[in-house]
C-alpha cells in the first residue's frame, strides 16, 4: 500500500488559489478514478477535483471553507502499487516546481524590482498578517517590500482576490495610483495657466486615503442576509472598478428593424437545421467585434501609465445565474468566428453558466464585455467596467416606436424597432470622441443589417 497526494490542479493562467467549499467524499470511502473528491471555488467559477487514482480516502489536509494554493496537496488517498503512485506524484510535484520557478522568474525578470536579486527563493518570504488575520502571498509581500508599501497601506488596499485577498494586480494598481499622486505637480503645472489655478508650488498632494467603512445599524424587523462568496467577490470587483477607472458614458439609439425582420425570417429554419435558437446576442457580438477591429484602441487595458493594446478580440458575455449572481464567460477570438460559430458559442456558454458547469478558463482573457439588460425589460442602463478591460457595452430591450424615415419623396413617420446602446469606458485612455464614434459604429453595423443574408 502507498499514499497518493491529491494535488489542487492548475485551473488557468491567472488562478492561483481556490476555496474548498465541500468535501464530496468522506474519510474511509472507496474512490474510483475520476470520482469527484472535492468541490472548489475560485474567484472566477466553481469546479470539482476528481481523483486520478483508485483507492481509499485516508485524510483531508484542508478544512472545508479554507483556501488552498494551486499545487498544494489537499487530501491523501491510500492506493495499491506504490511504484505507479510515486511516479504520478513525482510528475505532479515536477509541475509544481516548474510553476514555482516560473513565479520566481516573473518576480525577478518581469517586475524588475530593484534589489530583487537578493531574494534567493519565493518560499523564503513568509506571509504578512495584520491584527485582523489578513494574509498576503509571497509575491504580494515582495512587491510591497520593494516598493516601500507600508503595512498600514497594504491593509487598506481593497482586495479583488478570493475572500477579499489582495492580489498582485491590486498592489500594482495601488503603486501606480500613488506614483500618480506624487507626480501630480508636473501634471498640474500644464493646466495651471489655463485654469487660473493657484501656483503649483503652493499646493500639496493629498495622501490617498481609503474611505472609512460606513457602519449601518439594523432596525427593528430588518432581516440580515449574509452575502454568499460570489456576491462578495462581485461587490469587491465593482468597488475596485469604480476606484480604478474614471467612468464616462455614451449612448446611441439604433433602428434595428432590418435585424429584427431578418431574424424572424431565419430563426425557424435555423433551429430546425442546428437544433438550437439563434438569439440577438450573437448578432450584436458580431457587430461589436467588427467595430473593435475598426477601433483597436477600445480593445485595451491600462497598466499604470502604459496602454496594452490587445491582439485578440475576446468578448465577455455577462450572464445572470439562477441564484441572482452574475458571471461573465468569454468568447475567445470572436472576430474569427462565423455567425453560426458565434451563435453556438453563446448558447453553449449560457447553458453551462446556468448549469454551473463553466471551467475557469471559460471566464478568463476577456478584452471587452457585452451585457444585455434588455432581457429584463430594461431599455437603458450604465454598466460598470469589468476590470482590467477599458469598456463595457449594454443594450436595452427592442421596442416599437414611431420614427422619422427619410425617403426620396420626403420624410415620413413609421413604426420601427428601436434599441438603445450604452457604453461605459475608462476616461484615462478613451476620450469621448473615440468612445462615441466606436459606439455609433456598432449601431451602424446593426442598422445596416443585410436582410438577404444567408446563414
Image (cartoon, grey):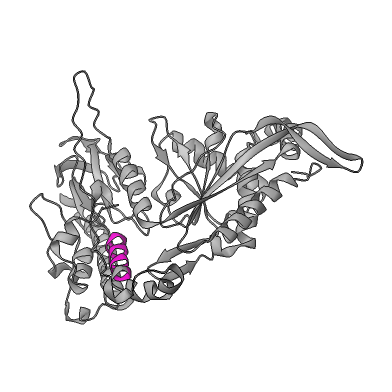
Q: Is residue 179 magenta?
A: yes
The front one of 228 and 387 is 387
Estimate the x, y position of residue 399 in percent, counting from the top left: 65, 30
Q: Is residue 415 above or below residue 149?
A: above
Q: How many marks can you see?
A: 0
For the stretch drawn in magenta, the main secondary structure is: helix
Q: Position of residue 203 (x, y in %)?
A: 28, 70
Task: Identify which residue, 191 or 261, lies in the foreground.
Answer: 191
Q: Is residue 403 magenta?
A: no
Is residue 173 found left or right of 370 in the rendered image?
A: left
Identify the image quadrant of residue 35.
top left
Question: Does residue 56 appear left or right of residue 292 in this picture?
Answer: left
The percent coordinates of residue 346 (x first, y second) are: 56, 42
Residue located farthest toward the right when viewing the structure as drawn: 409
Q: Is residue 363 visible?
A: yes
Seen at 65% across and 36% down, the residue is: 278
Taking the image as drawn, is residue 5 in sight?
A: no
- Along the line of sight, the residue nearer the viewer: 177 or 268: 177
Task: Read off the magenta span.
Answer: 168-180
Measured from the top left, where is residue 288 in percent x and y? 61, 51
Task: From this view, report whether residue 273 is shown above or below residue 143.
Answer: above
Name the residue at the top extreme: 221
Amino acid at each position: 500500500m502507498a499514499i497518493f497526494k491529491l494535488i489542487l490542479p492548475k485551473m488557468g493562467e491567472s488562478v492561483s488559489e481556490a476555496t474548498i467549499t465541500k468535501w464530496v467524499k468522506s474519510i474511509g470511502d472507496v474512490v474510483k478514478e475520476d470520482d469527484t473528491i472535492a468541490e472548489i471555488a475560485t474567484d472566477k467559477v466553481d469546479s470539482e477535483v476528481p481523483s486520478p487514482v483508485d483507492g481509499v480516502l485516508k485524510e483531508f489536509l484542508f478544512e472545508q471553507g479554507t483556501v488552498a494554493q494551486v499545487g498544494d496537496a489537499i487530501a491523501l488517498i491510500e492506493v495499491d502499487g506504490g511504484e505507479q503512485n510515486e511516479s504520478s506524484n513525482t510528475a505532479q510535484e515536477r509541475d509544481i516546481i516548474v510553476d514555482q520557478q516560473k513565479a520566481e522568474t516573473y518576480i525577478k525578470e518581469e517586475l524588475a524590482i530593484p534589489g530583487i536579486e537578493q531574494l534567493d527563493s519565493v518560499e523564503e518570504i513568509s506571509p504578512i498578517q495584520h491584527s485582523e488575520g489578513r494574509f498576503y502571498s509571497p509575491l504580494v509581500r515582495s512587491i510591497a517590500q520593494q516598493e516601500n508599501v507600508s503595512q498600514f497601506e497594504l491593509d487598506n488596499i481593497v482586495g479583488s482576490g478570493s475572500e477579499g485577498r489582495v492580489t498582485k494586480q491590486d498592489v500594482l494598481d495601488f503603486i501606480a495610483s500613488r506614483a500618480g499622486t506624487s507626480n501630480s505637480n508636473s501634471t498640474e503645472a500644464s493646466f495651471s495657466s489655463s485654469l487660473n489655478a493657484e501656483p503649483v508650488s503652493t499646493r500639496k498632494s493629498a495622501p490617498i486615503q481609503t474611505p472609512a467603512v460606513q457602519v449601518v445599524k439594523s432596525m427593528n424587523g430588518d432581516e440580515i442576509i449574509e452575502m454568499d462568496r460570489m456576491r462578495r467577490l462581485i461587490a469587491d470587483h465593482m468597488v475596485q472598478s469604480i476606484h480604478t477607472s474614471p467612468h464616462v458614458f455614451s449612448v446611441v439609439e439604433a433602428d434595428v428593424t432590418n435585424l429584427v425582420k431578418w431574424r424572424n425570417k431565419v430563426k425557424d429554419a435555423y433551429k430546425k437545421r442546428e437544433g438550437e435558437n439563434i438569439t440577438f446576442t450573437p448578432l450584436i457580438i458580431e457587430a461589436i467585434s467588427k467595430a473593435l477591429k475598426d477601433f483597436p484602441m477600445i480593445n485595451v487595458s491600462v497598466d499604470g501609465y502604459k496602454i496594452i493594446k490587445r491582439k485578440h478580440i475576446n468578448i465577455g458575455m455577462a450572464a445572470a445565474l439562477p441564484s441572482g449572481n452574475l458571471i461573465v464567460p468569454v468568447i475567445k477570438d470572436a472576430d474569427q468566428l462565423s455567425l453560426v460559430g458565434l451563435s453556438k458559442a453563446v448558447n453553449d456558454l449560457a447553458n453551462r453558466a446556468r448549469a454551473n458547469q463553466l471551467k475557469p478558463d471559460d471566464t478568463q482573457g476577456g478584452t471587452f464585455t457585452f451585457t444585455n439588460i434588455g432581457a429584463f425589460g430594461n431599455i437603458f442602463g450604465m454598466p460598470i467596467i469589468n476590470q482590467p478591460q477599458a469598456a463595457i457595452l449594454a443594450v436595452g430591450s427592442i421596442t416599437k416606436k414611431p420614427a422619422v424615415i427619410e425617403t426620396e419623396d420626403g420624410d415620413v413617420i413609421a413604426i420601427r424597432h428601436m434599441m438603445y446602446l450604452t457604453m461605459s469606458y475608462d476616461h484615462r485612455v478613451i476620450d469621448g470622441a473615440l468612445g462615441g464614434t466606436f459606439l455609433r459604429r456598432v449601431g451602424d453595423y446593426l442598422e445596416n443589417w443585410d436582410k438577404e443574408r444567408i446563414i
